[in-house]
């Protein structure tokens, strides 16, 4: 017996649990029956053709989200979502053992070379650079709260050493970690603006 095809809405700029809540509430207000919702994807009961997609798209846009329809755009957003989720939901040193190419290939069921090529052509940066930018944003967040040392942060984010994190931090932000801590206000970017 053939499995019923999944009805999935792809939503750009979902980067945190609050985003999931906001999208869930919006879709429920449209009467959408949600089967599963994760960052960037909403599996629904209804057939997509039965939904008022233009109205949903407009409502999502007002909240800072975007309904994706192009297949390449969906893949790019899925790559970003997987990287963001892995970095935002890190648990001690699991990023150190994660091989980005293998991780993305398994999560998207696609060859990494084709994912990397599509991402670079579309975004103008490599997947690796995007991942580094996300790690630096997470490091900035952790530094801002002051609950962890730079050594702990480098460990959490899977860096081989504090020096490696420090070098990338300086390269991306133009500041050392200690300079950042003293000038922390207004220096963080929103994750979806990267």
Image (cartoon, grey):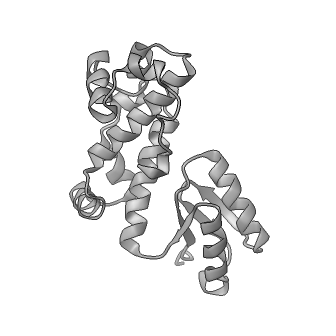
Q: Give the image location of residue 52, x and y in percent.
A: 67, 83
Among the 4 quarters of the image, the one containing residue 109: bottom left
Q: Seen from this angle, which residue lies furthest bottom?
A: 49
Q: Is residue 135 above or below residue 125?
A: above
Q: Is residue 118 above or below residue 131?
A: below
Q: Give the image location of residue 151, x and y in percent.
A: 39, 14
Name the one closer to the observer, 75 or 125: 125
Name the one closer to the observer, 76 or 184: 184
Q: Does residue 101 show up?
A: no
Q: Give the image location of residue 56, x and y in percent.
A: 65, 75
**Is residue 121 found left or right of 10 in the rendered image?**
left
Q: Give the residue at x 60% y 81%.
A: 48
Q: Give the image location of residue 17, x and y in percent.
A: 63, 46
Q: Does residue 177 show up?
A: yes
**Is residue 82 found left or right of 121 in the rendered image?**
right
Q: Give the residue at x 30% y 21%.
A: 166
**Number of marks in the image?**
0
Q: Give the residue at x 70% y 53%.
A: 21
Q: Give the residue at x 39% y 19%.
A: 179
Among the 4 quarters of the image, the one containing residue 111: bottom left
Q: Is residue 127 above or below residue 9?
A: above
| Quadrant where the N terminus is found in the figure | bottom right
């Amino acid at each position: 017996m053939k499995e019923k095809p999944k009805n999935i809405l792809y939503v750009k700029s979902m980067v945190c649990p609050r985003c999931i809540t906001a999208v869930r509430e919006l879709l429920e207000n449209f009467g959408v029956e949600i089967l599963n919702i994760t960052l960037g994807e909403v599996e629904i009961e209804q057939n997509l053709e039965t939904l008022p997609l233009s109205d949903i798209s407009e409502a999502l846009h007002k909240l800072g989200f975007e309904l994706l329809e192009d297949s390449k755009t969906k893949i790019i957003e899925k790559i970003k979502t997987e990287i963001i989720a892995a970095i935002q939901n890190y648990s001690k040193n699991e990023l150190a053992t994660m091989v980005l190419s293998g991780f993305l290939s398994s999560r998207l069921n696609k060859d990494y070379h084709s994912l990397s090529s599509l991402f670079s052509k579309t975004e103008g940066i490599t997947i690796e650079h995007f991942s580094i930018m996300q790690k630096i944003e997470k490091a900035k967040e952790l530094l801002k709260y002051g609950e962890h040392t730079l050594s702990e942060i480098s460990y959490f984010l899977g860096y081989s050493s504090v020096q490696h994190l420090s070098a990338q931090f300086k390269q991306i932000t133009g500041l050392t970690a200690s300079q950042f801590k003293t000038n922390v206000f207004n220096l963080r970017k929103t994750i979806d603006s990267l």
